[in-house]
Amino acid sequence: MFVFGKDCVMEDLGGGVSRKILAHNGKMMQVEVHFADGAIGYMHNHPHEQLTHVLSGEFEFTIGDEVKIVGPGDTLYKEPNIMHGCKCLKAGVLLDTFTPVREDFLKK
């Protein structure tokens, strides 16, 4: 399977956050998430495992009780059901990988 970013639809989530759903099958999914300066990824949890790779920008991330500043090249792992969220300190893009697929993202 080939997925070309230019063919993926950018979805405006509001508050300076938008996302493109990239490749996915029944077992995993990749999503590109764009943040404007000051945008918030509100604290939440879900039953999926998640990797987040910072492509650009700077973010203050909270995972459980830990808070760290991350930037390009950094990767974060979020175990299932752990509370997590972020504040964008410098506009940027995150690449999220989930397993299994986030069916809630696919429902329109």
Image (spheres, rainbow, N blue to C red):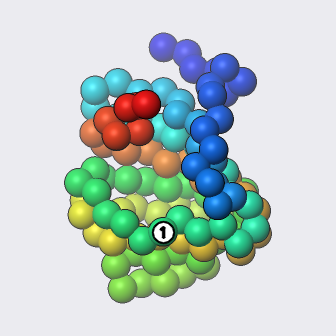
| Image coords of residue 95 (percent x, y) | 56, 48
The answer, for residue 48, to whether it is visible in the render is yes
Give the side of residue 74 with respect to residue 65, left or right. right
Q: Residue at x 37, y 53 (%)?
A: 50
Determine whether 37 is above or below 102 in the image: below
Give the side of residue 66 with respect to residue 46, left or right. right
Give the side of residue 106 with respect to residue 55, left or right. left
Q: Residues within 10 Å of mark 1 (few under 14, many from 20)?
A: few
Q: Which residue is mark 1?
A: 42
Q: Residue at x 31, y 63 (%)?
A: 45
| Image coords of residue 21 (percent x, y) | 52, 34
| Image coords of residue 6 (percent x, y) | 72, 24
Determine whether 74 is above or below 64 in the image: above
Q: Residue at x 28, y 26 (%)?
A: 26
Q: Secondary structure at mark 1?
A: strand
Quarter location, residue 108: top left
Determine whether 35 is above or below 8 in the image: below
Give the side of residue 29 with respect to residue 19, left or right. left
Q: Residue at x 60, y 38 (%)?
A: 11
The single residue placed furthest to the top in the displayed view is 1
Quarter location, residue 15: bottom right
The answer, for residue 33, to whether it is visible in the render is no
Q: Nearer the viewer, residue 75 or 98?
A: 98
Q: How many marks?
A: 1
Residue type beneath disc 1? Tyr
| Image coords of residue 86 (percent x, y) | 54, 71
Q: Nearer the viewer, residue 103 or 68?
A: 103
Determine whether 101 is above or below 44 in the image: above
